[in-house]
Each structure stands twice: as C-alpha cells, then as structure tokens.
C-alpha cells in the first residue's frame, strides 16, 4: 500500500489535470484558421442556396427558413455568466432558439444544457474543442463529434442531429476546403447549419448595430447568428431586449430550427450504457474542475506562506546571527564544569573509533560513555581495546536508541549530558561551544550544528545543502521564535534536571529527539541553537539508505506532533509552543512538503501544455529565492558556495524523493502501520576538519586541564 497509493495518487492527479486541460482547450486544441480558398468544387446549388445544408444522402440540398420565422442561434456556449441571461430573455419573451454548444463547455456546465432542453430550446453540435475542421483528419472530426455528443448525453441525456462548423458563416462562403468537411459531416447523419443573418455581436459594435444587423429584410425568414460565450456578451443580452419584442410586433415568431422547417425534432433520447458513459464523463469533469480548483487555491496559499517563511527565515536568521556574534554576547557565566557525553552505538564498528578519538581530543572536560546496544560486530570490544582515558563502555541487550540513551543517562556523572550518534565526529571545540548556553538557567537543551562530512558525492552534496539551509537556517529562526522542534541526534546537549522532569528519552515515537524537545518546551525550558558547536556526521550514501532514514524521521515527526497535540489547547509554556511551534512544524515540515509534488505536476503540465515561458520563469523565480536563502545560509556557516552548483538538480530529483518518502509516511500513519528501527550501513570515512578524528599521539595530546583518570 505504501508504494501503490502514492503512485495511484500521482497518476490520478495527473489524469485529472489532463482532463481539466482537455476541457479548457489547453490539450489537443488547434487554433489555426484557414484562409478562404477557391470554390471550384462546391456545387452551385449550395453556393446559391439556403443556410441549412443536407448532405446526408450524398446529393446535397439546401433549405431556407420560411417567411416571418426566425431561428435565433447562439454559438460557443454554454457560458456560466451570459448563457443564463440569454435564457432569461428568451423565457421573458416566450421565444425559442438553437444553441450550438461546444463539448468542453457543455461538460463543464451541464446544468445550463439541461436548462436549455427543459425550456424547449434546440441543441446543436459545435465540436468539442472548436477547431477549424478543414485542418483535421476524418478521425479527428469523428472524435470532435463523438465527444460533443458524449457531453450532451451526460448533461441532458440527448443526442442531436444539428451541426455548425466553427468559423463558418454563409453557404455562399463554402470553398474547396470547407465543402469536403460538410460532405463528410452529412455522411455521418448531420444537418449542417450555417446562417444567413450575422449580428456580428462578437465585434461588440453596440446594441443598436447588433439589432440592425440581426433584423431580416422584407419579412423574410432568417437564421440569425449570435453568441452566448467567448467574451463579454452584455451587448448581445441588451440587444435581445430590443430585438425580440420589436420583431414579435412585426409578426415574426422565434422558434426552433426543426419547427421552422416542419421537420422531426433534432433530439434523440440517450439510454443505457451510452447515457451512463456520458454521465460518468461529465461527473469526471466536475470532479477534476473542483479538485484542481481547490489545489490551485491551496498551492497559491502554500506558495505565499512558503515565500513568507523564506522571508521570515532570512530576517530572523540575520537577527540571531547578529545577536550571538556580538562581542559582549554571553549566555551567562562560562560553563567549565565537566559534562557527560553519551554515544549510543549499534553495529558501529566502521565509525566508532573515529567518533571516540574525536571526543578524546575535546577541549572541554568530559566523560565518554559508549552504550553498546547489543552490537554483533564487536563495536564495544573495539572501544575497550582503544584503552583511552575517560571512556567507559556500557553493554546492554538490543533495546533501541531511546533505551540506550536512558541507560547512558543513568550512568552519567554530570548534570549536563551531551548526546551524539555513533557515526559522528566532534571538533575539539564542539562540546565547549555546545554547553555554554547552559550558563542561562532557563536553557534546558541546546541544538548543535550538524554538518555532512561525506559531501563529495552528489547525494552527499544534496544533503549538505539540506543540512545547512533546511536544518541550521531553520534552527536560527526557531531559536528566535522560541519553538525549536528538534535537537539533532548527531549533536545535542541537555540539562539532566530537564530530562528528569519530562521522563527522559521516550520510546513512544521513532523521533525521540523531536519528542523530547517538544516535551521540554511544554515543560517551560528554553531550547536554543549553538552555531559553533559543529559535528560531522556520515550521511546516507545510497538512495535506499537515505529513503530508510528519512522515512523514519518523517513518520517519527508525525508521531511526535500527534503525541503533543494537546499543547494547542493548553496554557502557559505548553500552550505557547502548541500555538506557535506545532503549527509551524505541521505546516512546513508535514503539510507543505506533502503538497509540493503538486507544484512539480503543474510545472510539468505547464511545460508541455501551458504557457511554457511563464512556467519556466516562475520555476526559476522560486529557484532564485531558494538560492538566495541557501547562499545566505552558506555564508552564515562559512561554507564554500561551490556545492550550490547542484541546487537546481537537487530541486528536480532529490526533492521528489523526499516528497514520496513523506507521502509514504502519511500513508503509514493513516493505515496504522508501524516502523521499526533501521540500521544504515556506515563506511567510517568521515573526519572533522583538521583530522581531529585521528588517534592522539599520546594521552597528553588533549588540551586543557582534563581529568584523564580512567573510569573503572
């Protein structure tokens, strides 16, 4: 289900978007209009005949409307604004007419077609997408007719035998390109209806001019061409207010075409499968219209919010950097007392030695506790064989990372506890920088600056951009707002008193770092960010490993949000976090990324079917905004800008993977699935800058007055 549902969702979305584009003349539309051609192959009887052409039997004949009879025809509808007003005028003056509807409009506004039929008007076909049929193959002509009939069946349950070609005018205007189309249409069983009186309302010449042009001469009958769609038809509606009563006073009757010709009705009821097929099509169009309409509005709202977030992130990050980089800035009295560093490890033999050596070079007095969580690769033996001072190994049966951390807390001797991953290396100054905020007694936890060590590969470079921009820039913003959602597992520090008050590391979720951070906020503790506490972690080096890691992160974050949902209605610090932090995390870490694939679907659609230039410009505009934020984040972190070269490719490929992972996490949550901890394969290739992960030359190589007595 986790693979099937995302695929089904995206395919369904693309299908709805394609259907919407089809009925909006964005797909399969052909707007070419052919110039007039020779009339050498058009029968003379047609050129000199009436506006109704019957070529159903092979020998074409034309028909005229009898005197004092008017057939008002309206093209290109139905339109949601103007067609109801036209119908109201016809009803007001007890007049009937013929509406030559396009299939795309009939499918979008089926209620208006149903009203036309119910009020006694006649319906004719005007193709589905309004192309010039002289450019089209017979297959495309058949498609235009059948799709138009399908829309009529779904809207009003009828078929019609009347047809008017797009861009047609008078029978004497038939030429060598339009006449073969008329013959073919006749062979398909249709009467072709042009006109002999053109109101030219599409030119908007004014109400008076429309009335004059639509008025027949000398009591003659006429087929009058008007429009109820295709633009502003206010002049057409106003002209009906004059034309209808005026001609009625002169003895004219406004009637259906078949009534004027004393012929059987053009309508045939549709039943059975054809009827249900039409209704299904119209229903599908309605669903696609509503859903894509909602999505467009939703994307617009999300887009505004995301851009606002970018702006807020830049502003607050600037304020944070300016505050913590002032010469006189301090959290309080310098923190010099020893701290405990906990290293939970499960099968970390490839990395654990580099991790422990980097800690042994720390400039701050520490004890190092490696909690071996039932490793089967000799992780604990490797640490013990190093025989480094201040390092203890605690062995336990495999119970998971939260249990390992809680076990480490029980063995810790000091009131400040630093937590790191077994695949991470610290710089010598990392612990010192990380614990300085505890000079403020209100601080309960500190987030460090996690950095990707293996950034030389493409997937590593993408994660490097994500860490610097998406994580650390965010943390500066959240620090200022006072709602930091996560202390990274790679580098974080906690006041032991704060951990005790919230019950330690919880096993309720797969994101124990997010869970405990939210708990600390709700308990009233400050959670801050230490930009100079750098830790170098080994990011996943394959798509499968990255998928596993982010799947767990996303699902665990959702679990944590759900667990702490009551904070939204609580008072005090918990309520403040619930009404500021939780909405931020929910919107920008869970909901907005979930909608982000829609942006790419619309982008793909726009590139293929829509305004390509505007689509590309919009995408590059968003990319520029992201590049500005990324460049600023890199500048704050003193990172080389060269890695940003891969940013466009990251937006195209890496982002898609994250979207699918998040969507799968949603599905797992909705179907009540459970995830287990997944171990990533490590290479142990990450070192801190300057080679700090290398073995010290002697026990005295570590700086400062550090207690080097081994713990037994």
Image (cartoon, rainbow, N blue to C red):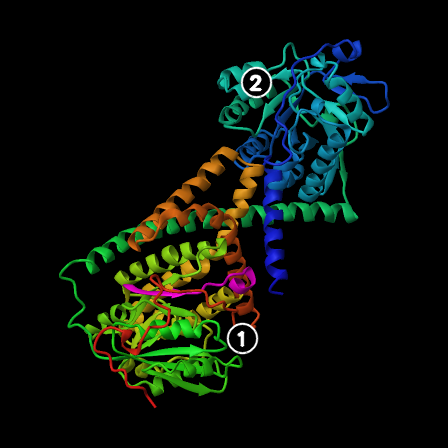
Residue 200's disc is: 2
> Was residue 533 drawn as part of the magenta stretch in this picture?
yes
Quarter of image, res 101: top right
SS class, disc 2:
loop
Residue ID at (33%, 57%): 473
Image side of residue 364 versus residue 175, left or right = left
Q: Is residue 563 visible?
A: no
Q: Quadrant of residue 492?
A: bottom left
Front position in the image: 544 or 264? 544
Q: Indicate which disc residue 676 carries.
A: 1
Q: If you read the primary sequence from the N terminus, does the residue marked by circle 2 or circle 1 appear first?
A: 2
- Location of the N terminus (image quadrant): bottom right
Magenta stretch contains residue 617: no
Image coordinates of residue 670 in percent, x first then y, are 54, 68
Extreme-left residue of the structure = 328
Q: Residues within 10 Å of mark 2 (few under 14, many from 20)?
A: some
User: Which residue is depicted at the point 57% across and 18% down?
Assistant: 200
């Amino acid at each position: 289900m986790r693979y099937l549902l995302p695929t089904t969702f995206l395919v369904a979305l693309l299908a709805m978007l394609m259907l919407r584009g089809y009925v909006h003349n964005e797909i399969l539309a052909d707007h070419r209009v052919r110039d007039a051609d020779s009339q050498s192959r058009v029968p003379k009887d047609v050129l000199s005949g009436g506006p109704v052409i019957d070529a159903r039997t092979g020998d074409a004949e034309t028909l005229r409307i009898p005197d004092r009879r008017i057939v008002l025809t309206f093209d290109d509808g139905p339109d949601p604004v103007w067609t109801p007003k036209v119908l109201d005028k016809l009803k007001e003056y007890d007049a009937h007419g013929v509406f030559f509807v396009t299939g795309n409009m009939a499918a979008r506004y089926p209620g208006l077609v149903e009203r036309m039929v119910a009020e006694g008007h006649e319906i004719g076909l005007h193709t589905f997408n309004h192309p010039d049929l002289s450019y089209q193959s017979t297959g495309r002509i058949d498609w235009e007719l059948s799709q138009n009939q399908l829309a009529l069946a779904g809207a009003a349950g009828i078929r019609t035998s009347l047809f008017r070609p797009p861009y047609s005018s008078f029978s004497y205007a038939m030429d060598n390109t339009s006449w073969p189309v008329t013959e073919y249409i006749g062979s398909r069983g249709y009467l072709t209806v042009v006109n002999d009186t053109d109101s030219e309302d599409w030119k908007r010449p004014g109400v008076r001019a429309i009335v004059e042009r639509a008025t027949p001469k000398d009591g003659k009958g006429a087929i009058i061409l008007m429009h109820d769609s295709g633009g502003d038809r206010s002049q057409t509606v106003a002209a009906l207010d004059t034309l209808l009563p005026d001609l009625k006073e002169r003895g004219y009757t406004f009637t259906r075409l078949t009534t004027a010709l004393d012929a059987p009705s053009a309508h045939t009821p549709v039943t059975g499968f054809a009827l249900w097929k039409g209704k299904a099509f119209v229903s599908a169009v309605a669903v696609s219209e509503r859903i894509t309409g909602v999505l467009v509005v939703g994307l617009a709202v999300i887009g505004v919010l995301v851009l606002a977030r970018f702006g807020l992130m830049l502003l607050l990050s600037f304020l944070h950097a300016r505050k913590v980089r002032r010469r006189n800035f301090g959290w309080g009295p310098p923190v010099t007392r020893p701290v405990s560093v906990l290293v939970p490890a499960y099968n970390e033999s490839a990395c654990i030695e580099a991790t422990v050596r980097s800690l042994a070079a720390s400039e701050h007095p520490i004890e190092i506790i490696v909690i071996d969580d039932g490793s089967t690769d000799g992780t604990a033996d490797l640490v013990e064989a190093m025989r480094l001072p201040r390092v203890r190994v605690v062995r336990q049966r495999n119970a998971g990372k939260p249990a390992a951390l809680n076990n480490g807390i029980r063995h810790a001797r000091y009131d400040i506890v630093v937590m790191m991953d077994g695949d991470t290396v610290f710089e010598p100054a990392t612990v010192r920088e990380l614990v300085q905020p505890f000079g403020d007694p209100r601080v309960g936890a500190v987030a460090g600056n996690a950095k990707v060590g293996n950034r030389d590969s493409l997937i590593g470079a993408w994660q490097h951009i994500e860490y610097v921009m998406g994580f650390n820039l965010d943390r500066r913003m959240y620090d200022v707002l006072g709602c930091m959602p996560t202390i990274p597992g790679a580098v974080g520090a906690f006041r032991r008193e704060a951990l005790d008050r919230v019950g330690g590391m919880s096993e309720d979720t797969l994101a124990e770092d997010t869970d405990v951070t939210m708990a600390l906020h709700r308990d009233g503790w400050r959670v801050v960010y230490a930009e100079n506490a750098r830790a170098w972690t080994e990011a996943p080096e394959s798509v499968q490993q990255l998928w596993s890691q982010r799947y767990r992160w996303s699902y665990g974050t959702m679990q944590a949000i759900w667990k702490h949902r009551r904070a939204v209605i609580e008072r005090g610090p918990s309520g403040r976090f619930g009404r500021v932090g939780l909405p931020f995390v929910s919107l920008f870490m869970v909901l907005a990324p979930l909608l982000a694939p829609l942006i790419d679907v619309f982008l793909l659609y726009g590139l293929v079917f829509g305004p390509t230039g505007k689509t590309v410009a919009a995408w590059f505009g968003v990319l520029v905004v992201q590049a500005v934020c990324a460049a600023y984040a890199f500048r704050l972190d003193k990172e080389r800008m060269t890695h940003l070269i891969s940013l466009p490719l990251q937006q195209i490929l890496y982002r898609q993977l994250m979207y699918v992972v998040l969507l799968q996490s949603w599905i797992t949550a909705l179907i009540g699935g459970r995830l287990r901890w997944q171990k990533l394969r490590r290479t142990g290739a990450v070192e801190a800058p300057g080679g700090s992960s290398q073995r010290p030359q002697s026990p005295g190589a570590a700086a400062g007055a550090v207690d080097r007595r081994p713990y037994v």
